Image (cartoon, helix red, strand yellow):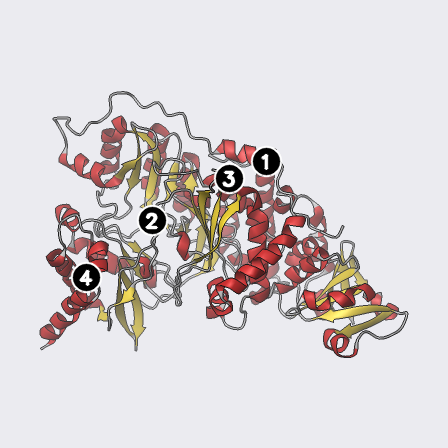
């Protein structure tokens, strides 16, 4: 994987020095609080409900064992011994002290990490398919492009004070695991008729209070044109995106209000101008980035686990069934380590667990780990023959939950337990749902199901694209949970539809149970997933299950 | 009075004696004054660069307003000016903070105009700390010209 060049190293050190100076100048009054705020945000530092929160970038979700161990050490030294992996493939520390933050940033720089542009109205940390470079269905590894975008967007002179935050996601597979259609810019790696590699460019997707599925502005953009084309999109946005209302400032609103054709015309005009002033990177720089992501040499032993091996541990079998995915190299596999234990906080890992993950990556996964936007950890390059040993080690560390893709593999934002913006709790709802459906056999019978929970309208928990979405609101001081059905974050992206009135905190779990019961009753076979069933029958049977029973219950 | 910030630090405004600065509205309504004196043009940050192309031949300074440091439109305006070949002076005026100096220079600005009050809070040394803006940046490495007209 990519390791820092001399330039990167010098850059992050200088950046830490600058942040120290900014903290000092805030304290001596040279910077007002208003002026300091965006500067601290662009270094990942938030002021939350109870404390500061430091959001550390894990660019495109790729991380090595040394970095994971350093995160564990930071959690022990400056936080409460754990960290929270997020839907943006980052990690958040929830309890740092302001005075410690420059030292934490230095400790990150020691292992080639930083917290740059994980917040603020700038181009945020780029996200990518968490199976990149390993997935069997991949056209091309998106990470060399993602790294190029990291470099291009870092400290960009023109685009660091945008109308609002700006998120870019990229996938190299036709099966979209990076939610590219719900980002300000989504990139899908495609090939044209001549077989040349390029990108489909999607603009104006996003969740939040005005969810929108992104629209294609270019069906095929040659690889060489990517940076000037993105400059063009950003310039159009920077100059004409709304700045009068923070809730209408994302590019999705600009695209919506301006119209797709007009936006395309403006982007193409700006692109013609940008191309002239963009000589492009030296081929040697591009080659070095590509080489950094070359696939590790995989030489799986011939003897691998076959499905008819007689002596099998049912727990292992169940885990392989849900948590192991097909690798592009036969005999190799991709392991998803669930950070969703029954009753746990989605995405949390203790420092000890982080160290176990680092050890496993070193021993079995060619020194690589990934963080998924679904808040799990990936071991991308393991041999099938090692799966029993990996499973045993994970069991010992409390990370062998066999629930990936099932009802208890829930995305949840931090909600009112941590977040200053939240209007309701999300973590306890996720915990209760997983406890209610604790039995893994029940979960498997229910089948693939994505529940996503946000504790406010900003939708960090991606509820709009959950098969079942749960949005926590504040109704006159009381938590109220609104349900949406039919959301989808993949290549067939769809915004979920509201079922109707919301449910109180003590009613939402029974409501979810009624939805599941309704699905189990109406599905055509075990092969028809919740989402497929919903698409076939529509909202009405689910609505009936939700509300007629609620009325009957109340009566 | 105001302070002009360049790579060498603070200086008085030398333009004040050298020529007039007309507002965009005036220039669009009445045309530029017919005189041989050097002319400057004031641009609000919602201006359309294409609309002023015809004026630029006669103008040797363009001053772009920064009503708030958080409003980054000025950076793109300066970039656009350079893209269409404007080779005169480009000045950012208003609320710009030292931490943005390198961004301004790399977007095509030559100088920043700040108030005396701002200069007493954010002192010369804090600006000079960013005078090394021309050292390599990520965008330079990726082949993005930081001064297209040059």
> Which mark is first along the chain, 4 or 2?
2
Q: Are marks 2 and 3 in contact (CB under 8 Å)?
A: no
Name of the residue lying farthest toward the top = A302
Q: Position of residue A479 (x, y in %)?
A: 27, 70
**Residue that label 1 marks:** A285
**Residue that label 4 marks:** A537
Name of the residue lying farthest toward the right = B36
Gap in angstroms between the C-alphas marked 3 and 1 = 18 Å
Point out the frontmost of discs 2 and 4: 4
Mark 2: which secondary structure?
A: loop
Q: How many marks?
A: 4
**Residue that label 3 marks:** A112
| Residue A373 relative to residue A146: left or right | left
Is the residue marked by circle 3 packed among few (<14), some (14-19), or many (20+) residues within 10 Å? some
Is the residue marked by circle 1 packed among few (<14), some (14-19), or many (20+) residues within 10 Å? few
| Residue B49 relative to residue A375: left or right | right
Q: Position of residue A532 (x, y in %)?
A: 22, 54
Gap in angstroms between the C-alphas marked 3 and 4 = 51 Å
Query: Residue at 53% across / 44% down in the picture?
Result: A222
Mark 4: which secondary structure?
A: helix
Query: Residue at 53% across / 62% down in the picture?
Result: A263
Residue A58 makes an appearance in the image: no
Q: Give the label on residue A375, or none.
A: 2
Q: Are marks 4 and 1 on the same chain?
A: yes
Gap in angstroms between the C-alphas marked 2 and 3 = 22 Å
Is the residue marked by circle 4 packed among few (<14), some (14-19), or many (20+) residues within 10 Å? few
Mark 1: which secondary structure?
A: helix
- Quarter residue B63 falls in: bottom right
Q: Nearer the viewer, residue B6 or A246?
A: A246
Point out the frontmost of discs 4 and 1: 4
Q: Chain of mark 3?
A: A
């Amino acid at each position: 994987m990519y390791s820092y060049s001399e330039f990167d190293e010098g850059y992050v050190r200088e950046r830490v020095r600058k942040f120290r100076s900014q903290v000092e100048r805030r304290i001596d009054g040279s910077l007002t609080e208003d002026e300091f705020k965006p500067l601290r945000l662009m270094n990942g530092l938030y002021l939350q409900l109870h404390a500061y929160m430091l959001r550390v970038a894990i660019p495109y979700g790729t991380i090595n064992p040394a970095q994971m161990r350093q995160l564990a050490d930071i959690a022990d030294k400056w936080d409460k011994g754990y960290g929270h992996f997020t839907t943006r493939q980052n990690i958040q520390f929830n309890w740092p002290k302001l005075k410690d933050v420059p030292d934490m940033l230095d400790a990150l720089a020691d292992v080639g990490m930083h917290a740059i542009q994980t917040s603020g109205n700038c181009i945020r940390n780029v996200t990518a398919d968490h199976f990149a470079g390993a997935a069997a269905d991949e056209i091309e590894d998106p990470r060399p492009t993602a790294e190029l975008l990291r470099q291009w967007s870092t400290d960009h002179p023109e685009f660091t004070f945008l109308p609002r935050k700006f998120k870019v996601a990229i996938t190299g597979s036709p099966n979209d695991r990076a939610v590219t259609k719900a980002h300000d810019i989504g990139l899908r790696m495609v090939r044209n008729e001549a077989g040349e590699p390029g990108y489909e460019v999607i603009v104006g997707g996003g969740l939040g209070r005005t969810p929108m599925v992104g629209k294609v502005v270019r069906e095929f953009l040659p690889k060489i044109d990517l940076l000037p084309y993105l400059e063009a999109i950003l310039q159009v946005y920077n100059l004409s995106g709304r700045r009068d209302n923070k809730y209408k400032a994302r590019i999705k609103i600009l695209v919506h209000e301006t119209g797709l054709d007009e936006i395309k015309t403006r982007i193409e005009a700006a692109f013609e101008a940008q191309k002239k002033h963009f000589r492009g990177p030296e081929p040697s720089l591009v080659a070095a980035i590509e080489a950094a992501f070359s696939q590790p040499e995989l030489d799986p032993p011939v003897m691998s686990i076959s499905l008819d091996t007689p002596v099998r541990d049912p727990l292992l079998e169940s885990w392989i069934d849900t948590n192991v995915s097909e690798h592009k190299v036969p005999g190799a596999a991709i392991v998803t380590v669930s950070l969703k234990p029954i009753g746990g906080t989605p995405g949390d890992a203790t420092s000890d667990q982080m160290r176990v993950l680092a050890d496993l990556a070193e021993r079995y996964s060619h020194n690589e780990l990934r963080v998924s936007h679904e808040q799990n950890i990936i071991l991308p390059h393991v041999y099938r023959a090692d799966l029993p040993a990996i499973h045993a080690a994970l069991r010992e560390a409390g990370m062998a939950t066999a629930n990936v893709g099932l009802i208890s593999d829930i995305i949840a934002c931090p909600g009112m337990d941590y977040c200053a913006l939240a209007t309701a709790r999300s973590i306890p709802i996720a915990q209760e749902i997983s406890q209610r459906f604790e039995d893994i056999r029940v979960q498997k019978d229910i089948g693939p199901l994505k529940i996503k929970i946000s504790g406010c309208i900003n939708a960090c928990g991606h509820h709009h694209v959950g098969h079942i979405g749960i949005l926590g609101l504040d109704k006159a001081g009381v938590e109220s949970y609104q349900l949406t059905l039919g959301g989808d974050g993949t290549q067939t992206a769809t915004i979920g539809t509201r079922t109707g009135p919301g449910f109180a905190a003590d009613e939402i779990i029974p409501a979810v149970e009624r939805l599941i019961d309704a699905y189990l009753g109406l599905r055509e076979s075990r092969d028809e997933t919740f989402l497929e069933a919903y698409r076939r029958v529509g909202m009405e049977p689910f609505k009936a299950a939700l509300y007629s029973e609620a009325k009957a219950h109340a009566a | 009075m105001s302070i002009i910030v360049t790579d060498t630090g603070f200086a008085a405004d030398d333009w004040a004696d050298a020529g007039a600065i007309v507002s965009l509205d005036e220039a669009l309504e009445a045309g530029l004054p017919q005189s041989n004196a050097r002319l400057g043009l004031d641009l609000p940050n919602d201006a359309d660069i294409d609309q002023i192309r015809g004026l630029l031949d006669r103008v040797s300074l363009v001053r772009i307003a920064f009503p708030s440091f958080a409003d980054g439109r000025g950076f793109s305006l300066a970039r656009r000016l350079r893209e269409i070949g404007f080779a005169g002076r480009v000045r950012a005026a208003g609320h710009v903070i030292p931490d943005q100096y390198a961004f301004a220079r790399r977007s095509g600005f030559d100088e920043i105009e700040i108030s005396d009050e701002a200069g007493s809070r954010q002192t010369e040394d804090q600006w000079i700390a960013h005078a090394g803006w021309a050292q390599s940046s990520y965008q330079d490495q990726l082949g993005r010209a930081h001064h297209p007209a040059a």
